[in-house]
Image (cartoon, rainbow, N blue to C red):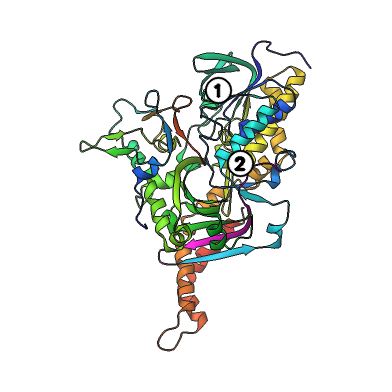
Amino acid sequence: MSQVMGLKAKLGLNVFKEGGEFHIKIREGKAKDQRLKKAILVCPAGLYSENPDGEVTISVDGCLECGTCLIACGPEVLEWRYPDGGTGVQFRFG
Amino acid sequence: MAAHEVSEGFDVIIAGGGLAGLSAAYTLASGGLEVLLLERGDYCGAKNVTGGRIYVSPVRELFPELWKQAPLERFIAHEEVSLMAQERSITIRYDGSELNEQPYQSYSVLRSKLDRWLARQAERKGAMLVTRSRVDDVILENGRVRGVRAGGEELRASVVLACDGVLSFVAQKAGLRKAYEAGNYALGIKEVIELDRQVIEDRFNLEGDEGAARLFMGDVTAGKFGGGFLYTNKDSLSLGIVVGIDALGNEEPDVAAPDLLDRFKQRPEIARLIRGGETVEYSAHVIPEGGLKAMGALYGDGILVAGDAAGLAMNIGVTVRGMEYAMASGYYAAQAVMNAYQKGDFSSTTLSEYRRLLEGSFVLSDFQNFRESLSVLENPRFFQYYPELVGNILKDLYHVPAGPKEKLYPTIRKHLGIKELGALFKDYRRLKKI
């Protein structure tokens, strides 16, 4: 059992409540912005990736709502708000 | 009671039910004010994460009734810090009778339990808590905050407390924040790993409710600014890393944040401590570490900012603190509000008493004393060079070769040439700033 647990499996342990619209959006025309590339490294949930066209995409499911991407990349490239009240991750331990 | 400045709405609206908001709500409600606290999670604590330890000493007297019942995990009786080189590590362990004497200085803690409990205490005092409610905006009239917008409603109050955490959109909308700078923030990532109580006590040499705290620096963050931590809870471990966001996003080598934690877990020193445990939660949170320089305004007309929202967390190496500052700032914000209430004046001039209260307390005294700590500790030599250097010296000191062993002094000098000694001296002088 010393196998490393995959990130997806780890995120699967958390309680998430679905709802509302995506709370993080890449701003129009910024998908290839260099600043956005940092999100791929810094996101603890691994939600950002780069597609073959060199555009960064995000899949918001599993977001831990930490805000690291916003701080690393800046509000010029990311539109960021907290998910609606009562949705998103609900930590049972914290 | 003095006349209200605003007769409609609440005396106080608090955005955010973490430790700052709840401490303020508890204090204000105890003082008889009408308090509405809005929390976006399903319950207080649902959106909060701690590395794992709260220092109770600085805030014990501010909440004398609370600590006997508070759901804390273990009192920390054993401290360890490890320098991790790539192939070896050096650990210093500190045990002392002072760590075993009541009242205990610090405890391991899980936020979901602590905050939920504190929310009940605030409610018992008469505060009104509404969960699942996100504050979307502040109501601004002629530069003065008059309330908040949440869930499509306008909620008015004499004063608003922004206790909405490190990103504090509430303080931002009130125009009190500085722009985010990656160098002023760190990312914390944590796993809570369940393990039998008995196994924890045997493995970490704990008696009863004793707990252990372990910090790790060096290779654990691939040499970047930050470190690893492990705290023992009653029947789980909190294991994680903290790493500067600037270092993570901009410095070589490129390592993805989740991989840092996995690498840490696979270190043999760590793997044997968590063996047999089951991860039950994976969490992350941002920590404000920029200190005084990064701090925005703490108050404005009709608004106060407390806790992480105000940037009140600090990293001074072996102690990384935030929760005590959150609780104390919530308490002092409440004091300032109650005085403003007596006067019937919630202008920034009156509310500026908040800053004076913080300056007269441990909160801003600490921030003043440790204002250089980030710039001193950010030295990459602490995270790359020294762990390897000390590891190599110990490796050679302990090594017994097949042939004759070299004398000790030349063994050490081999690692410490004039250049290294010069750099060491310079680093030592910088340390004097903290």
Chain letter of mark 2 equals B
* Marks 2, 1: nearer the viewer: 2
Q: Position of residue B83 (x, y in %)?
A: 50, 62
Query: Whole-Å distance between the Cαs marked 2 and 1?
Result: 24 Å
In the rendered structure, the answer to whether residue B359 lies left or right of residue A12 reads: right
Residues B68 and B181: in front is B68
Q: Position of residue B73 (x, y in %)?
A: 60, 48
> Looking at this rendering, what residue extends furthest in the bottom direction?
B404
Q: On the image, numbered disc 1 is attached to which residue?
A: B174
Q: Amino acid at mark 1?
A: Ala
In the rendered structure, the answer to whether residue B331 lies left or right of residue B242 reads: right
Residues B336 and B374: in front is B336
Q: Is residue B225 visible?
A: yes
First in sequence: mark 2 vs mark 1 = 1
Does B74 appear in magenta? yes
> Looking at this rendering, what residue extends furthest in the left direction?
A52
In the rendered structure, the answer to whether residue B100 lies left or right of residue A11 reads: right
Q: On the image, numbered disc 2 is attached to which residue?
A: B323
Label 1 residue SS: loop
Q: Amino acid at mark 2?
A: Met
Q: Position of residue B308 (x, y in %)?
A: 57, 36
In the rendered structure, the answer to whether residue B35 lies left or right of residue A81 reads: right
Does B208 appear in magenta? no
Viewport quadrant of the N terminus of chain B = top right
- State the residue at coordinates (36%, 33%): A61
Q: Residues in magenta?
A: B67-88
Residues A45 and B385: in front is A45
- State the residue at coordinates (44%, 67%): B88
Up-down: is B237 above or below B424?
above
Label 2 residue SS: helix
Q: Quadrant of residue A55?
A: top left
